[in-house]
Image (cartoon, helix red, strand yellow):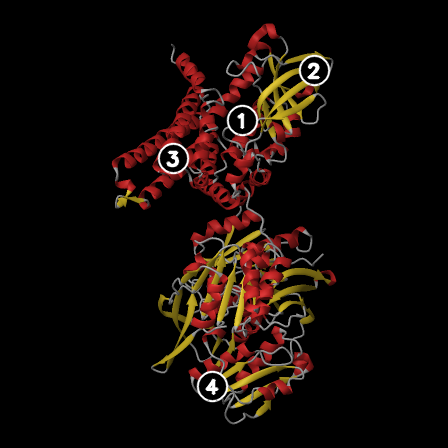
Amino acid sequence: MSEARPWIINPFDEIAIEEALRIRERGEAREVVGVTIAPSAAEEQIRAALAMGLDRALRVDDRRELDPYAVARILLAVVRQEKPDLVLMGKQAVDDDANQVGQMLAGLLNWPQATFVSKIEFLNGGQRAQCTRETDRGLEVIAVNLPAVVTTDLRLNEPRYVSLPGLMKARRRPIELLTCQQLAVEVQPRTTVAATSPAPRRSAGLKVESVEDLLVRLRQHEKVL
Amino acid sequence: MIQTLVILEHDGHCVKRASLSAVALARQLGGSYALGVLGSGVAEIADSVRSFGASVVLVADHPALAEPRADCYAAVIAETARQRGASTVVGTSSTFTKDILPRVAALLDAPMLSDVMAVEIKDGVPCYQRPLSAGSLCATVKLQGDVRVLTARGTAFHPPSPNGAPSPVEPIAFDAASLPNGTQFVSRERSTSTRPDLTEARVVVSGGRPLKDKETFERLIGGLADALGGAVGATRAAVDAGMAPNACQVGQTGTVVAPELYIAVGVSGAIQHLAGIQDSRVIVAINRDPDAPIFQMANYGLVGDLHALVPRLIEAVRA
Amino acid sequence: MDFTWSKEQTELLDAVQRFASQRLKANVIESDRNDCFNLEDWKACGQFGIQGLPAPVEYGGLGMDALTTVGALERLGYACKDNGLLFSINAHLWTVVMPLITAGTEQQKRKYLPGLCNGTLIGANAMSEPNSGSDAFSLSTTAQKAGAKYVLNGSKTFVTNGPVGDLFAVYATVDKSKGAHGVSGFLVERNTPGLVIARKLEKMGLRTSPMAELYLEDCEVPAENLLGTEGGGSFLFTRSMTWERGCILASAVGSMQRLLETCVRYANTRKQFGQPIGKFQHVAGKIVDMKLRLETCRLLLYRGAWLRTQGKSGFLEASLAKLHISDCWVKTCEDALQIHGGYGYMVEYEIERELRDALGSRLYSGTSEIQRNLIASLLGL
């Protein structure tokens, strides 16, 4: 059974939340705390996360478009305040390319990191986490000393569905509010999107009638075989 | 002093060809660039990249770096960038660079941009283009600050051909004893496949859920890939169903490919999958459903039962 | 008169709709064709809390008032196309859960409600018999007191959830000469010796809701499983009917909303003679009527439920709602079918199934004719 301190997850991603809940349900964690950086409109999602079973929920009030590094810096301040043993996060909400915040946070904290994790097990009485990572070279297994940052792969688990009783209980639970000012962190976005344009699209080609027809076209017209 | 530090990826034996795409990006950024090779017993690998026009090939060769542990690699890379005064650190987008380079960016207090597809220098300021919304949009982005970290989308940059005077090779000075020691490497799944790497293959054959099970997937998709000397890919649904390993996943959250020929078998064409193949030269789709979205972007479409068509195709290719 | 849902209600109703649209995605065409009950989806609903909507929190329910309950069921009907599943859930709620709440002993409530509320126990209703349908209280199943138990004998038909039921609400008479005042309700557990779940019945619609015949052959039921009082069965039945009639077609209202939206979409995209068919008055007129029906049904549904939240019985309003919504649902399905032309007749468009499902609504919980008789008598005729 791991020593006292709370776990944090960010941002609200169901897979990371689910994993944290399972860790707590196995008795390997005492508390699961969720953090999100968002304007007040996000409170509905935060309530849904509370309904899944978070012990506490924190919201850092910020309505700006933040780049991953800015998010990591804010989380750094929260982590320093909350002192968790493990930070779990899933798909990044801000950047659809995903998975920069966790690594950046780990770098700022100088904590070990395990990314794209599809399985976590705790060793040595909760002092290390053995993680299976999904890489483009195949599965890799590493062990990281805690405290550590872990980012989850989509295959880590299947999140539980929020139930109505959970939602009703969550309604009475408070969401703790924080500001960058309180956390003494100042971030400025350093990425500017100058323009967006539609990407060139491929158009539909033609339907072939048979395997033979296809091969003729690939061999003779496209010269690709 | 060098402008750009390019981090190369290798498997212990040779450099991953796709990682050389980052060299093309470094060239477009202008100025001098160095290639960085980290690992243990990598002298030959360092040698193999001496003819790519770098000012220098920097090597960190030490048993502590035998495996790409992110905390150690990031520390060495960041230190190297500082020592050499590099203002940009680049690598080709892969799970290796996605794991390590953001951490490097944090250590250098630098913004990071991933999957850069093109760069234009306007009034001395680089404008980077990268995809958004599963590849349906293209964003032009500028970064502030003196230092930046980028990953290049491998399919958008042609790896350069080796030529020119050989670059000198220099060791990177770092203190192995002060490297972080919080991560231990345990094991890696060894692929026994003789098939080409997804990012390097000229032909990729992918399968989706309709392949039913692992045996059928290997027989039909593996069979066709082998007949064509190609690599095997899979949709996320097929990987989730256990038909193919995760390393085969093609798409927005998997590997982005742009082969000469991409054959999609039983793939409906979910937008996340299409995002991973849109730069292929020729796309062929085989599907039972004539209204499957993939036919909207395939050069050639064959409507029918894949269980009958693929064996015929394999036979015809072999003939 | 405030017609708005509160912030809490909206949150809850939105959650129900989200749950149904994300989680209840079974292939209903196939289940309907094969006469299959979707136990997976039943369990998902149970875990989510549907089967315990109106039950008190201390027994595992959600303690929702009548109005929020019908709102939730309406959203379910909108987002879930499996009318049979919803029918089974309703039967479970109004024929077993609700009578237990209103007339059950503390012991009975503690024993059965938690399982009923989370869906692990499926409730089934055994009232109708081969010779007593509308004339419910003329039933012939007998219950003979014998010491600390009752011995039941008879046969029941149209037992919704019969094939899968864990707890049956069985109505029998302790004294046929007393007519309605002899009827008593009993809670009978599935594996009780003498409770024989017989032939599965194949229906025209609501085929994913399983239904069977039942035989009671010297079925011994412990006295503590008497529901309510001896001879108080008809009172119990009538009281639970208010809830049943007032709520059972809430999901139909959601279904009608979905059909309306489907028809508007179709009428705007389907072109014939060079224009969208929605431009033709005959088509537009039908859709307008669908909207009109939807709104009147909704108002009747909500008002009846609201009366119950005010502690009023709402018996008349429940009957009006049941009568009106069933007629409107059938008519709306017919219109939707007609608007879709030949496609509406095709199984894959799922409209013909809606019509088959809707037709049952004029029969259960008291036929439309019975509702009219009731309302007439309440009007003093």
Picture quarter with the C terminus of chain C: top left
* Three-letter residue code for mark 1: Trp
- Numbered tag placed on residue C151 in the rendering: 2
User: Is the residue at mark 4 from the same chain as the one at mark 2?
Assistant: no
* Subunit that carries the residue with mark 1: C
Q: Earlier in the sequence, mark 3 or mark 2?
A: 2
How far is mark 4 from mark 3, CA to CA?
70 Å
Identify the element where label 1 is drawn.
helix
Q: Earlier in the sequence, mark 2 or mark 1?
A: 1
How far is mark 2 from mark 1, CA to CA?
25 Å
* Three-letter residue code for mark 2: Val
* Subunit that carries the residue with mark 4: B
> Would residue A151 be seen by someone viewing this image from the given angle?
no
Q: Name the residue beneath numbered marker 3.
A: C337
How far is mark 4 from mark 2, CA to CA?
94 Å
* Three-letter residue code for mark 3: Leu
Q: Name the residue beneath numbered marker 4.
A: B3
User: Is the residue at mark 4 from the same chain as the one at mark 1?
Assistant: no
User: Is the residue at mark 4 from the same chain as the one at mark 3?
Assistant: no
Seen at 42% across and 33% down, the residue is C253
Q: Name the residue beneath numbered marker 1.
A: C94
The image quarter in which residue B134 lies: bottom left
Residue B227 coordinates in the image, percent (x, y): 58, 69
Residue B2 coordinates in the image, percent (x, y): 49, 88
* Subunit that carries the residue with mark 3: C
